[in-house]
Image (cartoon, rainbow, N blue to C red):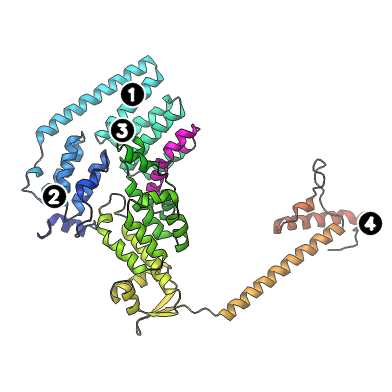
């Protein structure tokens, strides 16, 4: 599509607020999509097809071919409809009605067969057979795109699970369907269920990488970028090893995401939410995550440049890969915000040594023009991420002046008040002990008295003791007054 007029489909998409990417991505589509398996292959191809001006025809044709290899008629019709809007004269933009009719019959026949088998298992009252029947039915519904019934079938397995490994399998099945549905609360809930299971240490280690990756994905989708970064950084490298040994190994988890995705998602979330010290210690020096970063060297280079205060070079690397990330299934909705947070941190760090900086100098430092940097600064000040003011007449960014003398006075007064309060409480404690009004502990706890509990700086504790003291002194007056002669 490069060099041709923009199709009306993309004009409407842009007007509706959808992402439209003009620049060609750096990845090769065939190599990129070969890293995945299952439903996510179609989802990624379809997203690229409706978002990229450069790859739309190639991606949608690949999505149609992918749909015809499966049994989800809805996916096929969706891809064909999109291709028909973009290129109505293309041969693949016409629906294959014969294939649709044939597949609908096959799906109905398969559904009836599996439901009949499950009914027979229930009549025989064999738990394991019933569990497997629900599992087969759930996988069938997932393959044909009926995600709601798939979730129901997997959930009904619970009553027939007899071991922790059975429960773990059920939860992973639900996690997979929930990711495709975008039901991130269900993803997090089932991850916690698996983590709470009592399993063998070997089984626990085997699933930790998948759980961390899925949790990170759920937190990323929820906009909780810092927690997402922590989850991705804690992902065990055994997922990477599994993919290298056998891409079809279930530990590879490429029906959801790949080790390359973990490196990109974890790196970007870390850049957006961590300071330079944290990036150095928790990312660059992280022996586990280093294995993933080696797959995406540009992410490692960007983080290293940020830690070295070379913000312009770091942002330049990120901008060069922006088209790739805008075509990512899980990053597309978040990449603008993540990039904004990274740029905001860079600008704040750059401005720290100065009391004022010209907008021209900032624009030069961050490879942009004055008007763009001005809008960025306005946005940052509105969000509270930059404590400064803009002088539009002199075109200068001014830091807020802090009266150090007044600040020192306030800190001294606060310290004096705290000292006075502490002294008062200590005097009160001594007077209570002199009056013999301390509360004795139980006889079983020799050497521990109520006054031992009062040793902490707890206002409530002293207030309670003062109340007891007043009550006791009232009783004491009928017996000759306070023993220590102290009156309150």
Name the secondary structure under disc 3: helix
Q: Which residues are magenta?
A: 193-219
The nearer-to-camera label among 4 and 3 is 3
N-term-proximal mark, 1 vs 3: 1
Q: Residues within 10 Å of mark 4 (few under 14, many from 20)?
A: few
Magenta highlight on residue 420: no
Residue 286 visible to an observer of this rendering:
yes
The nearer-to-camera label among 2 and 4 is 2
Residue 149 - label: 3
> Quadrant of the rendered structure where residue 434 is?
bottom right
Locate residue 385, reporting x and y percent: 43, 67
Q: Residues within 10 Å of mark 1 (few under 14, many from 20)?
A: many
Magenta highlight on residue 208: yes
N-term-proximal mark, 1 vs 4: 1
| CB under 8 Å between discs 1 and 4 | no
Residue to which mark 1 is pinned: 133
| CB under 8 Å between discs 2 and 3 | no
């Amino acid at each position: 599509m490069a060099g041709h007029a923009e199709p009306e489909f993309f004009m409407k998409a842009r007007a509706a607020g959808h992402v439209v990417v003009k620049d060609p991505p750096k990845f090769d589509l065939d190599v990129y999509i070969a890293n995945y398996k299952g439903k996510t292959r179609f989802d990624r191809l379809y997203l690229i097809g409706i978002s990229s001006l450069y790859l739309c025809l190639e991606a949608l044709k690949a999505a149609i071919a992918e749909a015809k290899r499966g049994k989800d008629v809805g996916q096929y019709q969706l891809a064909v409809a999109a291709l028909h809007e973009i290129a109505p004269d293309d041969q693949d933009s016409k629906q294959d009605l014969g294939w649709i009719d044939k597949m609908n019959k096959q799906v109905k026949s398969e559904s009836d067969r599996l439901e009949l088998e499950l009914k027979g298992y229930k009549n025989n009252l064999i738990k394991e057979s019933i569990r497997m029947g629900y599992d087969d039915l759930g996988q069938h519904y997932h393959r044909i795109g009926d995600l709601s019934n798939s979730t129901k079938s997997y959930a009904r397995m619970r009553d027939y699970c007899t071991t922790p490994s059975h429960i773990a399998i059920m939860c992973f099945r639900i996690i997979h369907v929930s990711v495709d549905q975008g039901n991130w609360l269900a993803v997090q809930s089932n991850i916690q269920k698996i983590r709470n299971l009592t399993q063998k240490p070997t089984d626990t280690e085997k699933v930790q990488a998948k759980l961390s990756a899925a949790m990170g994905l759920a937190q990323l989708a929820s906009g909780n970028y810092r927690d997402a970064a922590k989850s991705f950084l804690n992902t065990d490298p055994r997922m990477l090893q599994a993919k290298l040994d056998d891409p079809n190994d279930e530990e590879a988890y490429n029906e959801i995401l790949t080790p390359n995705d973990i490196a990109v998602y974890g790196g970007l979330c870390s850049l957006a939410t961590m300071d330079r010290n944290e990036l150095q210690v928790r990312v660059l020096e992280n022996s586990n995550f280093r294995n993933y970063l080696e797959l995406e060297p540009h992410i490692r280079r960007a983080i290293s440049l940020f830690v070295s205060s070379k913000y312009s070079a770091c942002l330049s690397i990120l901008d060069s890969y922006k088209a790739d990330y805008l075509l990512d299934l899980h990053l597309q909705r978040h990449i603008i915000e993540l990039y904004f947070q990274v740029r905001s941190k860079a600008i704040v760090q750059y401005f720290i040594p100065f009391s004022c900086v010209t907008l021209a100098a900032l624009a030069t430092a961050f490879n942009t023009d004055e008007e763009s940097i001005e809008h960025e600064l306005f946005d940052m000040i509105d969000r509270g991420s930059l404590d400064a003011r803009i002088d539009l007449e002199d075109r200068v960014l001014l830091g807020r002046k802090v009266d150090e003398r007044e600040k020192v006075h306030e800190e001294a007064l606060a310290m004096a008040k705290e000292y006075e309060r502490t002294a008062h409480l200590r005097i009160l404690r001594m007077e209570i002990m002199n009056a013999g009004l301390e509360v004795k502990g139980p006889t079983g706890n020799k050497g521990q008295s109520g006054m031992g509990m009062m040793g902490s700086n707890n206002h409530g504790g002293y207030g309670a003791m003062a109340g007891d003291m007043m009550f006791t002194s009232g009783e004491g007056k009928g017996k000759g007054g306070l023993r220590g002669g102290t009156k309150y």
